[in-house]
Image (cartoon, rainbow, N blue to C red):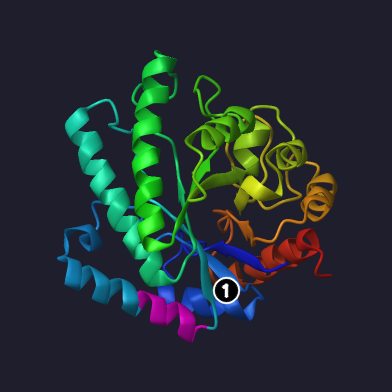
Amino acid sequence: MQIGIVSNVFHRLNIPLSQTLKYIRQCGFDAIDDQSLINVTANLYQLSDAEFEKAVSAHRKRVSDAGLSVAQVHGPWRFPPQDGDPLARAEWLRFCKRAIRGCALLGSPYMILHPLMPYGEVDENPDVVRQLNLDFLGELSVCGKQHGVVVCLENMPFGGQLLARPAPTLNFVKEINSPYLRVCLDTGHSAVLGISPADAVRLIGKEYLATLHVHDNDGERDCHWCPGEGVIDWSDFSATLHEIGFKGVLSLECSIPKEVDASGAEEKLAHFAAVANRLAGNT
């Protein structure tokens, strides 16, 4: 099984992207979860279509030159969300469609996306939330089909949300019934809600589980720790991935801890890779 990690793993450190990609490959990772399309206030979203294509294609070349592939892309995200405003929601749809185009240009088969959150962390009107997401993600799955990109809906860490837990997230994806909409299992978000990530893998199954955000926590906060540093049963998780025949990339969503400076960054990243390889069954 291939292993990957977020491209902004060194975001707390002043390390250029080219060097980051070099470190990621040297430490044994095969792929990245690309973060370049998350921030819609960045210049990338202000470019013309031609300029956007040129910029994204140049980024893909940097990744390829480092010996990596883009296994998945994290789609647009802002917090707090503004999804209750129809105009902001329409703008968000345009951003997400541009991001899907970006995924295709990067050679990524998957774009990971959070559900709409019109009421923030607690869905005050679940029926409204459900319909907004049906419309929004239904349209994005059509866009995904046009570009050959599968949109992966991520389970969330907010217990008051309709689409927080893996089970309703899976049922929602099944309801839209498109091969261009699948599930991204976030292990840390699952653990925060007291749900075993291994149980979530069994529930979602091979057909619907397309991508992973793999990280650990204390069972209460979304800490993004390296697997093995928190409460998750990683032996069960690893065994279950193999049990269902998961064919995707085991991708870590961890970053270098605050106590590690630039001099220790590569060593810590090598530790991340060793952990990922063990979970993937490569060692």
Can residue 229 be found in the magenta stretch?
no
Q: Residue at x 63, y 40 (%)?
A: 188
Vertical side of 48 occupied by 176: above or below: above
- On-image quarter of the N terminus: bottom right
Q: Residue at x 57, y 53 (%)?
A: 253
Residue placed furthest toward the top: 124
State the residue in front, 88 or 266.
Answer: 88
Magenta span main SS? helix
Q: Which residue is mark 1?
A: 24
Q: Is residue 214 visible?
A: yes
Query: With 214 as the anchor, is 125 left or right in this view?
Result: left
**Where in the figure is residue 254, as x and y percent of width and height?**
59, 54
**Where in the figure is residue 87, as x and y percent of width and height?**
17, 33
Query: With 122 as the anchor, is 157 left or right in this view?
Result: right
Query: With 68 as the anchor, is 115 left or right in this view?
Result: left
Q: In the picture, residue 202 is in which quadrant?
A: top right
Q: Which residues are magenta?
A: 59-66
Q: Is residue 38 visible?
A: no
Q: Residues within 10 Å of mark 1 (few under 14, many from 20)?
A: many
- On-image quarter of the C terminus: bottom right
Residue placed furthest toward the bottom: 65
Q: Residue at x 55, y 56 (%)?
A: 255
Amino acid type, callout 1 = Ile
What secondary structure is marked by label 1?
helix
Q: In the picture, residue 192 is in which quadrant?
A: top right
Vertical side of 38 occupied by 131: above or below: above
**Where in the figure is residue 96, as x and y percent of width and height?**
32, 49
**Where in the figure is residue 2, as x and y percent of width and height?**
68, 69
